[in-house]
Image (spheres, grey):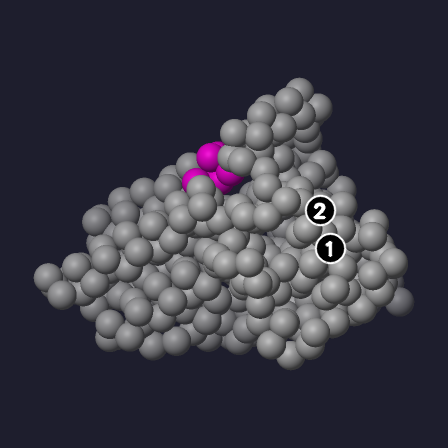
């Protein structure tokens, strides 16, 4: 027994992986007992009254059912989570492979409270769709314009799901396209022009959704219509967020800054969580430093800054800070995979599996079940 305990202390990564799985199950059991206010109403809203923001998922659901049960939030969200987890496992296998040496890296990423565990906590929210589509882009061939076109299509879908994806996952999608297509395959007039037009189109769609995508009818009529889409119209408590289809950008920013003194108290917690990922960030920095091209290194750093600036804008506009910081970290994880696909001048040493400090950080992150939606935990 003492030998087993000593081995676990020295190399606990398989155990941490199992604990993470158990934690995720616990988060799911807890989540399905909570009323899905925002996720449910998104399944009800469609394009019945014309083009409006945040309506794509509801419009797709409307193709299959006239009445939306509450359990569909968890069924659809759970299925999306499983697909995303499977896609990420495939991506990790493709990029790094599953070996004893890469297991600490997998635990730090897949077991991070920023990633799959928080996606489980936010089950039914739209964030995970951006992650899933970005992973698909990391898995598919990137040699032709079809790759750029697919990325543009994914970005369009995400903006139609929720226009804030222009800041949330479109920047990392652009990063993936630049790294996997333009840096690897080279640039020419055709693919540069195609990419520029695609970006302009997605940006125009964002502005259309943001400024012309509000509901064109009185809120009372809108709520009455949503009740006709509910499997149980008596659950009017689930419609309390109908106002978000009427709220202008100025009001969202005003609410965010009004809550800032209280919400900013969570920043030290976010900083601590980021610090606990130090072994992962060091590995990421080493990957960037090992790139064969100085140009590639500079562009990767610029991309990371660009992604982070987009999230700073989100922090100023909407106050779901725990979600934003979690998705920022996920974008960092996905960019790490993209960087690994670039030519390197030397091999980057993996995260040390036997390092005691690394083991402690991994254990702490494993035991943290989620980051949250607005405030930490």
* Direction left: furthest residue: 189
Q: Position of residue 255 (x, y in %)?
A: 62, 28
Q: Which contiguous range is marked in magenta?
A: 310-316
| Distance between mark 2 and mark 1 Cα atoms | 6 Å
The answer to which quarter of the image holds residue 227 is: bottom right
Is residue 223 in view from this perspective? yes
Dot label at residue 90: none
Q: Is residue 264 above or below residue 7?
A: above
In the picture, the quarter occupied by the C terminus is top right
Indicate whether residue 314 is drawn in magenta: yes
Q: Nearer the viewer, residue 320 or 254?
A: 254
Q: Secondary structure at mark 1?
A: helix
Question: Would residue 83 be found to the left or right of residue 231 on screen?
Answer: left
Q: Residues within 10 Å of mark 2 (few under 14, many from 20)?
A: few
Indicate whether residue 373 is drawn in magenta: no
* Residue indicated by mark 2: 220
Q: Nearer the viewer, residue 287 or 326?
A: 326
The answer to which quarter of the image holds residue 143 is: bottom left
Q: Secondary structure at mark 2?
A: helix
Q: Position of residue 254 (x, y in %)?
A: 58, 25
Dot label at residue 224: 1
Task: Please say if the residues under marks 2 and 1 sit with CB atoms less than 8 Å apart.
Answer: yes
Q: Nearer the viewer, residue 156 or 108?
A: 156
């Amino acid at each position: 027994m003492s030998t087993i305990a000593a081995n676990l202390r020295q190399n606990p990564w398989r155990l941490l992986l199992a604990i993470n799985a158990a934690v995720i199950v616990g988060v799911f059991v807890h989540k399905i007992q909570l009323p899905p206010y925002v996720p449910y109403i998104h399944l009800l809203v469609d394009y019945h009254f014309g083009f409006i923001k945040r309506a794509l998922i509801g419009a797709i659901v409307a193709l299959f059912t006239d009445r939306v049960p509450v359990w569909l939030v968890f069924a659809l969200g759970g299925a999306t989570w499983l697909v995303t987890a499977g896609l990420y496992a495939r991506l990790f296998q493709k990029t790094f492979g599953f070996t004893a040496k890469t297991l600490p890296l997998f635990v730090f990423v897949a077991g991070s409270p920023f990633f799959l565990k928080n996606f489980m906590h936010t089950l039914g929210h739209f964030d995970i769709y951006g992650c899933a589509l970005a992973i698909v882009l990391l898995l598919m061939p990137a040699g032709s314009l079809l790759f750029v076109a697919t990325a543009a299509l994914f970005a369009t879908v995400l903006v139609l799901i929720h226009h804030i994806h222009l800041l949330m996952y479109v920047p990392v999608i652009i990063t993936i396209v630049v790294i996997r297509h333009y840096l690897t395959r080279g640039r020419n007039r055709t693919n540069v022009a195609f990419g520029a037009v695609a970006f302009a189109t997605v940006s125009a769609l964002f502005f259309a959704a943001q400024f012309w995508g509000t509901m064109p009818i009185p809120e009372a009529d809108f709520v009455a219509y949503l009740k006709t889409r509910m499997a149980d119209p008596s659950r009017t408590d689930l419609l309390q967020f109908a106002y978000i289809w009427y709220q202008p950008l100025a009001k969202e920013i005003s609410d965010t800054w009004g809550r800032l003194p209280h919400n900013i108290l969570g920043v030290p917690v976010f900083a601590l969580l980021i610090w606990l990922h130090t072994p992962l960030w060091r590995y990421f920095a080493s990957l960037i430093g090992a790139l064969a091209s100085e140009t590639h290194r500079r562009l990767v750093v610029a991309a990371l800054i660009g992604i982070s600036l987009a999230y700073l804008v989100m922090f100023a506009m909407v106050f779901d800070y725990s979600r934003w910081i979690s998705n920022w970290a996920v974008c960092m994880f996905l960019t790490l995979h993209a960087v690994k696909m670039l030519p390197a001048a030397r091999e980057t040493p993996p995260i040390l599996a036997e390092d005691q400090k690394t083991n402690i950080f991994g254990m702490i992150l494993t035991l943290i079940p989620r980051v949250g939606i607005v405030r930490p935990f």
